[in-house]
Amino acid sequence: MRAIAIVLFGALAAAPAAAQEKPVTLKPGPGLDQVEANCGACHSLDYIQMNSPFLTSAMWDAEIAKMIHAFGAPVSDADARAIADYLKANYGADHVTENR
Amino acid sequence: MINRRNLLGTAGAGVALVGGGLALPRLFEGEVEAQPLALGRALPEGVRENASLDTLPGKKPLIRLAYRPPNYESPIEYLRTPVTPNNEFFVRYHLSDIPQVDAKTWKLSIGGDGANGQAALDLDELKRLPAVEVTAVCQCSGNRRGLFQPHVPGVEWGYGAMGCARWKGARLKDVLDKVGLKKEAVEIVFNGADGPALEKTPDFVKSLPVWKAIEETTLVAYEMNGEPLPHWNGFPARIVVPGWTGTYWMKHVVSINAVTKPFDGFWMKSAYRIPVGKFPIVARFISQETPVNTPITECVVNSLITSHADGAAVKAGARVSVGGIAWDGGYGIRIVEVSTDGGKTWAEAALGRDAGRYALRTWTYHFTPPRGRTKVTARATNAIGQSQTAALILNPAGYHHNVMQTVTLVAA
């Protein structure tokens, strides 16, 4: 399913709407590959930076659930776990002090 | 506060500032001292570090919050005039598949089970209907969401997810007359040409109650400030719903359907809802109400100080002209008051020209600040007696922020 997402992303990158898009560099860490491949299929990754660092772990879980269930993102269970761990560790309110 | 002029001096104009996170193009160099970007400390750290001034085709630099779907707000200095130029107007999309619509092949289909028939209009046919022009504020429901404490997830807007334009188009009522409404019709449903990246993502589709859809000023607009709509603001035609928040102002509109049952798509049923009873809202959307929440409808009364940024330096003992804008959901601004003593006393500001009840109203207030720091607070009240709030009205999605704004002037 992720392959479909990547193909779509490729098509979008060429569309006029995305012509201005510059690469968004997120913090390195385990799970970043899954974030880029899944989340980046539908939206630029600055959405993650913008919503930080104030989301608690429960709020990040809710965001991921919303992307999968409300917006139909085809994310595998394993990827969803990796994404959740990455976001909580790098962009979460609960981990913000230890990462600074 | 960081002195951006000094930063520019060391980094060189036009060079992206990595440390501050703000790429300030040369255009802004001269304005930086008086009006730094309104990325105040109230915004999430992630916004302050990553938002930048970026230029979409046909636009002046706007504050980029997100590339895709594109969400760009106007810096406060673009909001000093009663009408916002097209190239300074904010950009807001929900979904990332945004086609360049060809005016020659664009068609607007009209129908639905609440209509007596079906019709289609091309752009020339739409323009042959009687034209109406209305000056109206278009404001995102979530304007100022980034100022919520505690923060809520979403696009973390500052003050600039709004603008005011002269919108010209056909009355939606006249467009609906092409098919005629059944008496059972409860809502009018709109779809635009833009769509989601994934098939499973709910398309952005919105509805209005029939009573609002057939008001004289609700338009299918094809002109903005005397020009065709910019691509980023809905070319070739968009719905204009004066008084109501931007979520109903469907861009690139391609279909209008009258329905006999409340439309239950995601963007009506789950999104853009406010808790029942928390806001002083007059305009109701009864067919969509539940016991706990209701769709957002009209804008709440609000104002913005545009003349001075928070922390701006002024001359002690010299007269200062503080000014800004005020607007509401279409009742009209009755008074704007200013306090320079933390809200103990209020003085009336002078209102600018009245360009209609849906338009921005400019205001100015003169006073002579003493040496030191003076807090200046503005408060607008509308014609039905509603005023801005002192404390934020919390709601899960971060809508209707109309807390009185305060800027500190530093007189030396």
Image (spheres, coloured by chain):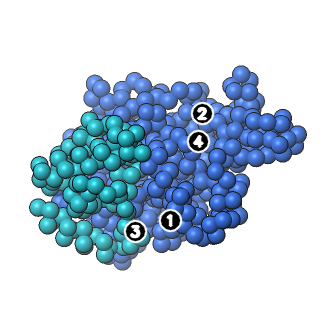
x then y, percent, for residue B230: 47, 67
Provide the chain ID for the residue under circle 4: B
Check disc 2 and report the residue beneath it: B404
Badge 3 marks a residue whose secondary structure is: loop
Check disc 4 and report the residue beneath it: B327
Foreground mark, 1 or 3?
3
Badge 2 marks a residue whose secondary structure is: loop
Question: Which lettered chain is shown in cyan?
Answer: A
Residue B123 in view, yes or no:
no
Check disc 3 and report the residue beneath it: A22
Give whichever of B410, B238 is nearer the camera.
Answer: B410
Position of the C terminus of chain B by quadrant:
top right
Query: Is B32 above or below relative to B387?
Result: below
Compute the Cα span from label 2 to label 1: 29 Å
Q: Are marks 2 and 1 on the same chain?
A: yes
Q: Residue furthest right?
A: B317
Badge 4 marks a residue whose secondary structure is: strand
Q: Amino acid at mark 3?
A: Lys
Q: Are marks 2 and 3 on the same chain?
A: no
